[in-house]
Image (spheres, rainbow, N blue to C red):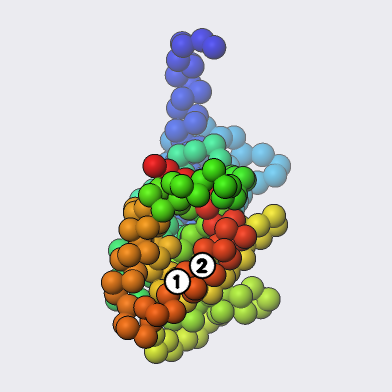
């Protein structure tokens, strides 16, 4: 592949066309319209008018298609967040995000990366919205995760199991919610409304879930509080130490039943493919 730069006219054409298609759409009329007056005059003059319309109108077609495509990808990647905002308001937030973080990869599916952090910065006073964006991001990450062979303990692993870390599969995410957003996300998936969805009331106590990627979708598995605590500790600690930490935080009544419950949690997690292997 040659290292020579392309001709100057091509670079200028690409720069002018890039400026045109990235020009934000005008929202002042209540519909999304191309703001052709914001196009670079010198570039528009270089594009000849034709029987298909004047130069600005023809460029506007690409301008609208660019933004509509990006909005569609973001809405599909953050469906719960989009419904809580309502699509009109969501697209406004998406525009600010895309102007601050323009797509930089040939893979359009990478474009939404970091959107949940942008929502958290802009809407820190709306905890349900911030939590929804993080849930959507975790769901998206699990759905797109590469296929990994799930870890199945062998008899040879028995001697080192308690002194090793169980590695969480990239196709698994542990999430906590203060609002019933997993159930809301599931319910809204069958609706076609574009109006903002009502914020659900906060839960009396937090709930924990494991999102598990499967062929064609994502399974959401409810976790008990101590179970979620154990799995969160396993990310950094050997199994034996993680179990000891959970035991230390239990009441006397909880502690008596902990060994049997922990065996059940671990057996189910292995069956569902939570882990990808062991690390010393």
Task: List the residue tagged with mark 1.
Answer: 259
Residue at 30% across, 66% down:
245
Regarding residue 168, the answer to whether it shows in the image is: yes
Q: Position of residue 187 (x, y in %)?
A: 62, 79
- Counting other residues with Cα less than 10 Å from the Cα at mark 1, is it few (<14), some (14-19), or many (20 or more)? few
Q: Nearer the viewer, residue 218 or 270?
A: 270
Dot 2 falls on a residue whose secondary structure is helix
Q: CA distance from mark 2 to mark 1?
A: 6 Å
Q: Nearer the viewer, residue 184 or 3?
A: 184
Q: Where 222 sits versus 122, above or below?
A: below
Q: Position of residue 216 (x, y in %)?
A: 70, 57
Residue at 37% across, 85% down:
253
How many numbered markers are drawn?
Answer: 2
Regarding residue 140, the answer to whether it shows in the image is: no
Residue 149's label in the rendered image is none
Q: Where 195 sits versus 71, above or below?
A: below
Q: Nearer the viewer, residue 139 or 267?
A: 267
Q: Position of residue 130 (x, y in %)?
A: 38, 70
Residue at 69% across, 55% down:
215
Tags 2 and 1 touching, CB below 8 Å? yes
In the picture, the quarter occupied by the C terminus is top left
Q: Position of residue 267 (x, y in %)?
A: 57, 63
Task: List the residue tagged with mark 2.
Answer: 263
- Counting other residues with Cα less than 10 Å from the Cα at mark 2, is it few (<14), some (14-19), or many (20 or more)? few
Residue at 64% across, 73% down:
189
Dot 1 falls on a residue whose secondary structure is helix
In the picture, the quarter occupied by the N terminus is top right
Q: Where 44 sits versus 191, above or below?
A: above
């Amino acid at each position: 592949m040659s290292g020579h730069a392309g001709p100057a006219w091509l670079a200028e054409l690409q720069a002018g066309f890039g400026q045109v298609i990235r020009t934000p759409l005008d929202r002042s009329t209540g519909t999304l319209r191309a703001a052709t007056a914001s196009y670079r005059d010198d570039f528009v003059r270089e594009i000849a008018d034709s029987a298909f319309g004047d130069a600005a109108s023809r460029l506007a077609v690409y301008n609208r298609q660019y933004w509509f495509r990006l909005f569609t990808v973001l809405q599909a990647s953050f469906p719960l967040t989009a419904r809580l905002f309502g699509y009109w308001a969501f697209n406004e937030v998406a525009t600010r995000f895309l102007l601050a973080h323009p797509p930089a990869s040939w893979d359009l599916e990478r474009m939404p990366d970091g959107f949940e952090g942008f929502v958290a910065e802009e809407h820190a006073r709306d905890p349900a919205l911030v939590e929804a964006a993080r849930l959507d991001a975790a769901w998206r990450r699990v759905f797109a995760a590469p296929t990994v062979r799930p870890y199945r303990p062998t008899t040879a692993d028995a001697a080192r199991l308690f002194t090793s870390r169980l590695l969480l599969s990239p196709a698994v995410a542990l999430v906590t919610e203060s609002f019933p957003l997993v159930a809301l996300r599931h319910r809204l998936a069958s609706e076609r409304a574009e109006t903002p969805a009502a914020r659900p009331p906060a839960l009396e106590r937090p709930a924990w879930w494991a999102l598990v990627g499967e062929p064609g979708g994502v399974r959401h598995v409810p976790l008990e509080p101590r179970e979620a605590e154990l799995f969160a500790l396993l990310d950094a600690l050997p199994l034996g130490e993680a179990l000891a930490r959970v035991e230390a935080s239990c009441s006397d009544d909880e502690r008596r039943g902990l060994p049997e419950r922990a065996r059940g949690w671990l057996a189910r997690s292995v069956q569902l493919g939570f882990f990808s292997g062991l690390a010393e």
